Each structure stands twice: as structure tokens, then as C-alpha cells.
Image (spheres, grey):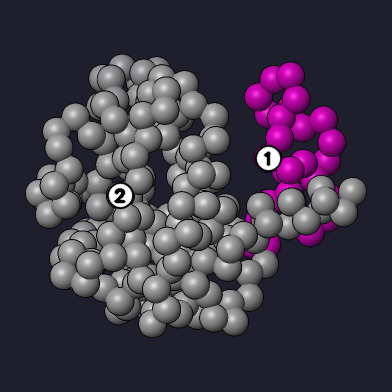
Amino acid sequence: MEQVLFFEHNLKTTRSVRRNLDFDRPIEQADLYACIDVAVQAPTGLIGEGWRFLVVTEAAKKAAIAALYCETLTTLMAERGLPLKSSHQALMDRLHDIPCMILVCAVGEPPEEIGGQIGFYGSILPAAWSLMLALRGRGIGTTWTSLLNARAADVARLLGIPEGITQTVMLPAAYTKNATLKPAARAPAAAVTFWESWGNNRFEAPEP
């Protein structure tokens, strides 16, 4: 039972980490390979083992990617009439300094029909999540970012990504510094689970 609780604790506390990061300490290559070895054990389907992980550590390339990310996020929030969260601003301010950026890519392109798209992305995104969990286990903080897909052509030119490769998420990664990771305040299972038919809550949600 202790192993189960420890496993569930890690799942519940793998959060987006945008602060309390060590920007001066490079991530050890052995740690990255170990985490990617975990990621490639994720369940897959349509793409088979067509995942690829592009690690970026060069300062100039990180700065260029950070500029694309910041421009895209600023424009998006302005279009939606929403202010930037302080945590997002903190990431934008130091994104170019992050020790490494990991782009999770898939060989191939998603089909046009929605069912095929579900199968395509459902074969790569579990690997990205497994990678995020593995990084968490080694004291490496990151956050799930997908905004760069709006600038995929620019990123491809910058990093030499060939045609026929689909970019999915980018994980900016750094060792954490005194980061306190805890479960978020979310609705409990009983409040979001239906039984046998939509809207049928077999059990009442517990009092908050």
C-alpha cells in the first residue's frame, strides 16, 4: 500500500513548475536519457514507436524559441482580453535561461478525420506525460506548453525539423529549487463521474 500511495502522490503532484527553478545548473544528460527511456514505454497505437524527442540547450536557439513563445502567448491573451498570470509572466521572463527545452514530436502527420486525429495524438501525448512524470521523479520541474504549434513552421526552420514531423508539446525543464509541489484543488471523482448514462451520479459528491 505504501508503494501505491507514493505512486499516487507523484501523479497528483506533477504540476506545472514555472518558479523556483535552478536556471544555472545544466540538466545531466544521463537524467534526460533515463527520463526519455521511461517516456518510450508509454502506450501507443497509430504511430507505433514514431516518437522523437528534440532537446535544445544552445543559448541562441533557446532565445529564439523563447521569443516565439512569448510573442504567441502575449498575442493570444490580448486577443482574449485576459491578463497574463503572474506564473506565466515568470516563465516568460526567464524562458530563454531555462537549461533545456524538450520538444516531443511524432513521425507523420495527423489524418483529417477526427477519429484519426484522436488515434494519432493519443499515441504521442501519453509519452509526453510519462516524460513529465519521470522528470518530476528526478527533481526536474517543467510545464506542459503547446503554444509553439502556432509557430511550428518557424520552429522547424530554426531546428531543422523536416517535413512530415508533427510537433506536439515543448517541456522547458530545470532542476527545482525548494519547490513545494502539492495536489491542486480539484473537484473530486464523485462530482465528475457518471454511471451507466450521462448525468447519472450514482453517489453524491462529498461535502467540500
Q: What residue type is disc 2 on?
A: Leu
Residue 197: percent from the left, percent from the top? 69, 20
Residue 81 visible somewhere in the drawing = no
Quick one: 51 or 143, which is closer to the camera?
51
Q: Quadrant of residue 64?
A: bottom left
Q: What residue type is disc 1 on?
A: Val
Task: Say which residue appears at 36% left-offset and 18% top-offset.
Answer: 116
Residue 15 visible somewhere in the drawing = yes
In the picture, measured across the screen, residue 204 lies left or right of residue 111, that is right
Task: Say which residue appears at 34% left-offset and 39% top-offset.
Answer: 52
Task: Check disc 2: other Cα within 10 Å, few if <14, some if 14-19, many if 20+.
Answer: some
Residue 12: percent from the left, percent from the top? 67, 55
Task: Please state which of the two labelled residues, at mark 1 or mark 2, is closer to the viewer.
Answer: 2
Q: Quadrant of residue 41?
A: top right
Task: Check disc 1: other Cα within 10 Å, few if <14, some if 14-19, many if 20+.
Answer: few
Q: Based on the picture, tell me whether residue 199 belongs to the magenta stretch.
A: yes
What type of secondary structure mainly makes up the magenta span? Answer: loop
Residue 143: percent from the left, percent from the top? 45, 60
Quadrant occupied by the C terminus: bottom right
- Tag 1 residue: 192
Instruction: Determine whether the residue tagged by mark 2 lies in a helix, strand or loop.
Output: strand
Quick one: 160 or 63, which is closer to the camera?
160
Q: Is residue 31 above or below residue 8?
A: below
Q: Quadrant of residue 179?
A: bottom right
Magenta stretch: give its range: 183-208
Q: Which label belongs to residue 54?
A: 2
In the picture, measured across the screen, residue 142 lies left or right of residue 198, that is left
Instruction: Determine whether the residue tagged by mark 1 lies in a helix, strand or loop.
Output: helix
Q: Based on the picture, tell me whether residue 177 belongs to the magenta stretch.
A: no
